[in-house]
Structure formats: structure tokens, C-alpha cells
Image: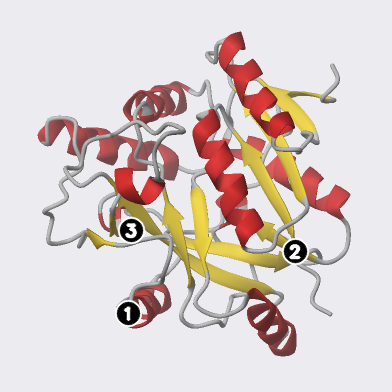
């Protein structure tokens, strides 16, 4: 009998409406166990923190850990690895709170194939979702994600020059790198990659990215490579050149109408070519111990 994987995620100060939609989406895929940690950088107001945590409790999910302090590059990795350890032996579904995975084949079949191949991983590819006019639109409980962000394109890959690949499912015995982008020695063989709808480009992201750029540049938020800073600067430069919007008419990023309801017919060919052609950056250097403070949910 197929046992659905445990969902592992580190959640930041997201909108309660997005967290609610995210949990509903994965429950619709059959996920029953959620192991979540919440991280709140120092600039996050106490009221926002309370609202996010209250939403998690309302959804029936008690946080495994609550972390505060700088958002170093290793912060997510440290928290995620602790969650994976607590989740125990078996398969883990890895997803950030703005990532909504969409499967063209049953999850059970993909996991069975990964076990047969010996890779211990299932791979995905991010498709960045944006508003129809490219505006960084807000999202609330009265809306549907597909309505607010109807277009999908390869912004992360084409504009930011970031790694668009994701390890979406991994066996507990497989270490996964920072950002869930790869697992050294366990490259996924599934084709096409799982579609990962990436709903990052919302209201407030420009301020978040500007803060990331400034703090990465001055060392307030530590990173192992210049990638985080360079990607942030590329986005900010793009927004400056396009009046604070994403250029949805770009022939490079190829934005098209998509939906969470179905994987588009063009996905298999285009996504397979992209993920097969991608070459990762150099492995990051060893990380120093986290400077964040981690407390139990009750503290």
C-alpha cells in the first residue's frame, strides 16, 4: 500500500491566505503529515508573526520549530534537515510555501520508479507565476491563485539565471543541497520533471529582494556564494527598467496562460529539454553554524 510522503517545509512570514491555499493544495494531493518550521527575521512585526502561526494552528498543523534572527543561506537548510530527521525513515516531499507541485503522473508511480532506479529522488522544475500585466499583485482569501497569477514563464532560469530545478521528493537517506535544488550523486531520472508552480512574484517581494540584496552585500545575511546577491540584483534591475513590473511580453521568459488544475501539453517537451541542458553551479562551501535562535513552539 502506498504511504504518502511527509511534507517538509520552512515557512517565512507569508500571507495567511497563501499558507491556507498551500496546505489545501497538498492535502488535495493526499499529503496528511506536515512537518513545518517557521523562521521570522528581525524586521518582521510581532503581529504578522502571530497571524502566521495562528493560521498554522487553525489548519491543524503545530509548528515543529520556530526560529528567529538573520536569514542566512544556511538557515533554511539547518531547519529543513532537523525536520527531516524528526520525520523519520521514508519519503519526504520538499516544498517552499510559494511552491505548488503539479503531477502529470501519480506520485506513487514516480516514487516507485525512483526506488527502482536507485536515485532516491524525484525532480521538478519551477514555472514562475505572475499577474497578467506583470504587476506584483497581492493575494488574499477571497481570490484564487490561478485568477491573480494566470501566467507562467521561466523567470528564474531566463532572467535571474538561477537554478530552476527542484528536488520535489527525496528518500530520507538522501541528503539534499541548499534550496532543494539538487542532491549530490542522486540526480533525478524522471522525465518530464514535476511542474512546480512558483508563486513568489507577489506584493511585497520587491522590498524583500531589496533587503536580501542589501543584507547579502554587507554580510548581515551570510551566503556561501554570490548567487543570492546577483539574482536579487538582476530582479531589482528588471523591475526598475519596467516600472516595477515583470515584463510578461518578454520573448525570452515565454509567459503563457497556465493553471494548477492541469499540466499544459507543452510542458513535457520544453521542461525536459530545459532540465537536461541545465548545468549546476559549483557546490557551495561548508557552512558555519547557524546564528539563528531556535525555540520550541511553546516558548
Camera-side residue: 175 or 42?
A: 42
Q: Earlier in the sequence, mark 3 or mark 1?
A: 3
Q: Mark 2 points at which residue?
A: 5
Task: Check disc 3 and report the residue beneath it.
Answer: 157
Residue 292 appears in the figure: no
> Dots 3 and 1: beta carbons under 8 Å?
no
SS class of the residue under badge 1? loop
Task: Provide residue 173's location: percent of width, then percent of height.
Answer: 81, 66
Q: In this view, does 230 lie above or below 215?
A: below
Left or right: 205 in relation to 283: left
Drawn side of residue 297 relative to residue 231, left or right: right
Query: Comparing marks 3 and 1, which lies closer to the viewer?
Result: 1
Neighbours of disc 1 within 10 Å: few (<14), some (14-19), many (20+): few
Where residue 248 appears, x then y in whole percent?
16, 50
Residue 255 placed where, x, y %?
Answer: 22, 59
Mark 2 → mark 3, Cα distance in angstroms:
28 Å
Q: Quadrant of residue 66?
A: top right
Question: Which of the 4 image quarters holds residue 256?
Answer: bottom left
Number of other residues with Cα within 10 Å of mark 2, as a class: few under 14, some 14 to 19, many 20 or more: many
Label 1 to label 2: alpha-carbon separation: 27 Å
Q: Going 38% across and 53% down the picture, which residue do you hit?
A: 162
Amino acid at each position: 500500500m502506498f504511504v504518502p510522503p511527509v511534507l517538509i517545509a520552512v515557512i517565512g512570514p507569508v500571507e495567511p491566505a497563501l499558507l491556507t491555499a498551500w496546505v489545501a493544495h497538498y492535502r488535495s494531493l493526499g499529503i496528511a503529515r506536515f512537518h513545518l518550521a517557521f523562521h521570522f527575521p528581525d524586521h518582521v512585526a510581532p503581529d504578522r508573526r502571530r497571524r502566521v502561526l495562528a493560521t498554522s494552528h487553525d489548519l491543524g498543523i503545530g509548528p515543529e520549530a520556530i526560529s528567529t534572527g538573520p536569514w542566512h543561506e544556511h538557515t533554511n537548510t539547518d531547519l529543513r534537515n532537523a525536520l527531516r530527521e524528526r520525520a523519520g525513515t521514508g519519503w519526504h516531499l520538499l516544498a517552499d510555501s510559494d511552491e505548488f507541485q503539479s503531477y502529470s503522473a501519480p506520485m506513487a508511480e514516480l516514487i516507485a520508479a525512483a526506488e527502482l532506479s536507485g536515485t532516491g529522488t524525484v525532480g521538478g522544475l519551477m514555472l514562475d507565476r505572475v499577474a497578467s500585466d506583470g504587476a506584483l499583485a497581492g493575494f488574499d482569501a477571497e481570490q484564487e491563485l490561478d485568477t491573480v497569477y494566470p501566467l507562467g514563464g521561466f523567470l528564474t532560469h531566463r532572467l535571474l539565471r538561477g537554478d530552476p530545478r527542484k528536488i520535489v521528493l527525496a528518500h530520507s537517506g538522501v541528503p539534499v543541497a541548499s534550496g532543494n535544488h539538487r542532491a549530490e550523486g542522486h540526480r533525478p531520472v524522471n522525465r518530464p520533471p514535476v511542474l512546480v508552480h512558483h508563486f513568489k512574484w507577489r506584493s511585497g517581494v520587491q522590498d524583500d529582494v531589496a533587503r536580501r540584496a542589501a543584507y547579502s552585500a554587507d554580510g548581515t545575511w551570510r551566503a556561501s556564494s554570490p548567487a543570492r546577491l546577483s539574482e536579487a540584483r538582476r530582479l531589482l534591475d528588471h523591475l526598475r527598467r519596467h516600472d516595477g513590473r515583470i515584463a510578461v511580453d518578454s520573448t525570452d521568459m515565454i509567459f503563457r496562460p497556465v493553471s494548477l488544475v492541469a499540466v499544459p501539453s507543452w510542458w513535457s517537451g520544453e521542461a525536459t529539454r530545459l532540465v537536461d541542458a541545465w548545468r549546476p553551479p559549483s557546490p557551495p562551501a561548508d557552512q558555519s553554524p547557524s546564528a539563528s535562535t531556535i525555540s520550541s513552539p511553546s516558548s
